[in-house]
Image: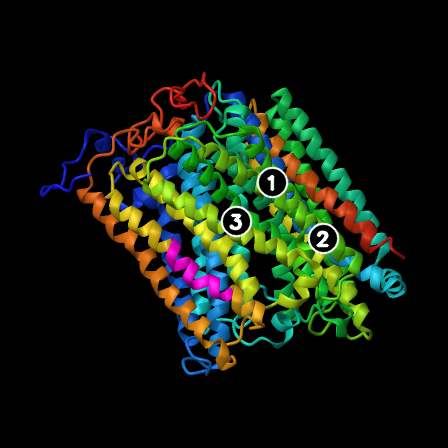
């Protein structure tokens, strides 16, 4: 990709694209075009990513020294709570589904839009309303409950705007529900002729599984948060033993949502990686049916493992044993995916393009995060590392190493489709590498810290932990810079990038058959699918 | 604003999508109330004797009459759907009107019941909780108030939607069956939730 002195002129495709179908603010804020709504989400979640990232920067800066020198105890508690709440509900959960899912699902299945376009727009407004509540919480001083809102801390002792932030998450939940509902109906009812279930891209399968969780789990979170608010406002008492309630009920209800929510965050990423791996290897995905089925298996089994967050809570040991077993079971479909990606890459024609590098980074980090999850599933080991940095490192490997890497991978893979412009590949490679290095530098030391006994959620620690904490904080600096880098060259490419053409990667899939950026109504004529998915021509002469 | 494009190729496809969307939405409603039912089940498991004793303090017969009223309203909703499928817009409007009227009757009776409980000092709100002496009694009445209150909110929304639909169809010679069917599904769900709330709260005596 050469950089020319003159920015390339607007292409014919761009003139008739969804981008130019209206230029006023009103045309964006009242749009029902799934592609424009995806852009609205992309802008909003990027904003919240920076807010959450800023809170993380404060946390890591404070942890540079064993002494509490940057923030008060209260301030530190509020910083990490805010980081968790913003990142989970305002970035990770909507990240891939609401941007790439919204943009790509209708294109991939040969539809002109999602099933309920106006509901789709409403969902964005609900998300923004929830976001305003979250920002109001921030302005009013935040909360110190952690993102988990455990009772009785959240219901009886916590200071700060617990009710307000619970409202924020409650409201945003309905945005998730509507999006999930929209996706399920779209995938069921709007597939074009010939697009059978066995021909769906794996991105669609994983979004289907995600949507099932969004629809079934989120309402439970809603009622749980409502009960917390009622407890604080009216003394409801359902989580307060002094009033006849049970604080463990909160943990059960919360994790009934929040463990499946982990899969809400990672399943779309798994779908992205399947697309990236197939396109990078230029081969059909090995064991397509198993990769598709494993998404559904993860969604179903994921509903049955919530008790593994509660091994030390005093729940029955028999319950713990069963939850431990089921948590091992849920690792099997994840393992299937990793093995099948590896088999797909075998003898592939691999180009070291940014999407491939992000996918490789994802697989490495996801494997580490997944295997340490198995360590945590062991009842005896969990007692040792429960509530330590080992757990923090484990879930950041999945949520950040996994999902955020996949998000950037998706951004680099579909950016030419979304914007119609190519970005400098070399810079994409640098960013992928820097993110991988920065991430490991940040979070690998936390495994060691946790195993040596450093508890999470404390900002004062024994001096012998300082070296690892400094390593982790410097890694966070690298990671932060690496996350900023794509913003520079991607924005630069909007004006200066070369026109992408419909299919710059030579990938299969209906989204690559339309112009880049796609026209307003996606397909002039509804396509008909006659070939299996990932129908790359396998070159046989090299065997 | 650009003209929104229909994602559907024909009417039947749209019909199927609308119905499926509504069924999924009802699934989310069941999960929402499911959290409350879990809380009630746990309370009863942990305090079986007290739960039964406090259930006796509710007005069994008001609840029973409300069950009758709501089930009857669901019959009217079903008849409205039937009329709409036959293409009889005005008949559908009349049945929908009856549905909404019975829904309002339910709310009126429920309000009377709340008033009685307030006077008896059983309602866990300011000024109405004089007779609540034990923690479990208060918890039971709280769960009662939250779950019946959430149900009443759903019913109120249902009444508004049904009334609006009846108004639109009041002079219609024919009717598109889909809006009536979808509204009917929602109404039945409100009914079904009550069918579970009534035994869990009132009949645990």
- Label 2: state its secondary structure: helix
Q: Chain of mark 2?
A: A
Which residues fall within the magenta stretch? A436-446
Q: Single out the residue that lies furthest toward the left.
A: A5
Task: Indicate which disc, 2 or 1, sits on the residue closer to the N terminus.
Answer: 2
Task: Identify the residue under disc 3.
Answer: A367
User: Rounded to the nearest whole Å, what is the CA distance between mark 2 and mark 1?
Assistant: 17 Å
**What subunit carries mark 3?**
A
Question: SS of the residue at dot 3?
Answer: helix
Camera sees residue A30: no
Q: Do marks 2 and 1 share a subunit?
A: yes
Q: Is residue A243 left or right of residue A333?
A: right
In this rendering, position of residue B167 left or right of residue A479: right
Q: Position of residue A359 (x, y in %)?
A: 42, 43
Residue that protrudes farthest toward the front in the picture: A543
Q: Residues within 10 Å of mark 3 (few under 14, many from 20)?
A: some
Mark before the other along the chain sequence, 2 or 3: 2
Quadrant showing the N terminus of chain A? top left
Instruction: Identify residue for label 1.
Output: A333
Residue A145 x %, y %: 56, 70
* Rendered image quadrant of residue A234: bottom right
Q: Are marks 2 and 3 on the same chain?
A: yes
């Amino acid at each position: 990709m050469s950089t020319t002195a003159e920015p390339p002129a607007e292409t014919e495709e761009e003139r008739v694209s969804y981008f130019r179908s209206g230029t006023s603010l009103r045309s964006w804020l009242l749009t029902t075009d799934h592609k424009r709504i995806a852009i609205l989400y992309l802008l909003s979640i990027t904003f919240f990513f920076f807010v959450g990232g800023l809170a993380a920067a404060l946390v890591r800066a404070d942890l540079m020294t064993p002494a509490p020198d940057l923030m008060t105890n209260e301030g530190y508690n509020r910083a990490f709570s805010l980081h968790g709440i913003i990142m989970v509900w305002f970035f990770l959960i909507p990240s891939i589904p609401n941007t790439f899912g919204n943009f790509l699902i209708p294109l991939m299945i040969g539809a002109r839009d999602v099933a309920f376009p106006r509901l789709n727009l409403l969902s964005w407004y609900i998300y923004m309303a929830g976001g305003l509540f979250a920002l109001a919480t921030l302005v009013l001083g935040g909360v110190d409950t952690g993102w988990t809102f455990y009772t009785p801390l959240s219901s009886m002792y916590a200071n700060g705007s617990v009710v307000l932030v619970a409202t924020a998450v409650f409201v945003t939940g309905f945005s998730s529900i509507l999006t999930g509902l929209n996706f399920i109906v779209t995938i069921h009812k709007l597939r074009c002729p010939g697009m059978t279930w066995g021909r769906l891209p794996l991105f669609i399968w994983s979004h289907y599984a995600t949507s099932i969780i969004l629809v079934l789990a989120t309402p439970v979170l809603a009622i749980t948060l409502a009960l917390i608010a009622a407890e604080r406002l009216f003394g409801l008492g359902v989580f307060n033993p002094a009033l006849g309630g049970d604080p463990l009920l909160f943990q059960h209800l919360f994790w009934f949502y929040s463990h499946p929510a982990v899969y809400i965050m990672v399943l779309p990423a798994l779908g992205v990686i399947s697309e990236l791996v197939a396109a990078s290897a230029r081969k059909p995905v090995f064991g397509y049916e198993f990769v598709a089925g494993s998404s559904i298996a993860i969604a179903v089994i994921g509903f049955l493992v919530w008790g593994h967050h509660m091994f030390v809570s005093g729940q029955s040991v028999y319950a713990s044993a069963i939850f431990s077993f089921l948590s091992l079971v849920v690792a099997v479909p994840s393992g299937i995916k990793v093995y099948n990606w590896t088999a797909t890459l075998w003898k592939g024609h691999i180009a070291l393009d940014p999407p491939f590098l992000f996918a490789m980074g994802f697989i490495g980090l996801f494997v580490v995060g997944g295997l340490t999850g198995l360590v945590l599933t062991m009842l005896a080991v969990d007692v040792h590392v429960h509530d330590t940095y080992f757990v923090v490192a484990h879930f950041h490997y999945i949520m950040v190493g996994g999902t955020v890497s996949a998000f950037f991978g998706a951004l680099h893979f579909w950016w030419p489709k979304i914007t119609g412009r190519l970005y400098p590949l070399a810079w994409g490679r640098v960013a992928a590498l820097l993110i991988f290095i920065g991430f490991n530098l940040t979070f690998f030391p936390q495994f060691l810290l946790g195993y040596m006994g450093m508890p999470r959620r404390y900002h004062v620690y024994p001096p012998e932990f300082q070296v690892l904490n400094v390593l982790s904080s410097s890694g966070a600096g690298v990671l932060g810079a690496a996350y900023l880098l794509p913003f520079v060259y991607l924005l630069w490419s909007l004006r200066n990038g070369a026109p992408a053409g419909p299919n710059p990667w030579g990938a299969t899939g209906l989204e690559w058959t339309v112009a880049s950026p796609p026209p307003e109504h996606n397909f002039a004529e509804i396509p008909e699918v006659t070939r299996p998915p990932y129908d790359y021509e396998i070159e046989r002469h090299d065997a | 604003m650009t003209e929104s494009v229909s994602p559907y190729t024909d009417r039947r496809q749209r019909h199927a999508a609308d119905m499926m969307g509504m069924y999924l939405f009802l699934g989310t409603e069941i999960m929402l109330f499911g959290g409350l039912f879990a809380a009630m089940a746990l309370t009863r498991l942990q305090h079986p004797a007290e739960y039964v004793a406090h259930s006796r303090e509710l007005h069994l017969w008001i609840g029973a009459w409300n069950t009758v009223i709501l089930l009857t309203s669901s019959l009217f909703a079903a008849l409205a759907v039937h009329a709409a499928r036959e293409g009889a817009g005005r008949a559908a409007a009349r049945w929908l009107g009856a549905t909404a009227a019975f829904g309002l009757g339910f709310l009126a009776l429920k309000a009377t019941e709340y008033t009685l409980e307030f006077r008896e000092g059983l309602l866990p709100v300011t000024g109405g909780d004089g007779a609540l002496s034990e923690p479990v009694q208060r918890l039971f009445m709280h769960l009662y108030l939250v779950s019946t209150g959430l149900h009443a909110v759903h019913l109120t929304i249902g009444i508004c939607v049904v009334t609006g639909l009846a108004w639109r169809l009041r002079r219609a010679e024919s009717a598109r069956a889909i809006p009536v069917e979808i509204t009917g599904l929602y109404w039945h769900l409100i009914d079904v939730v009550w069918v579970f709330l009534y035994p869990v709260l009132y009949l645990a005596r």
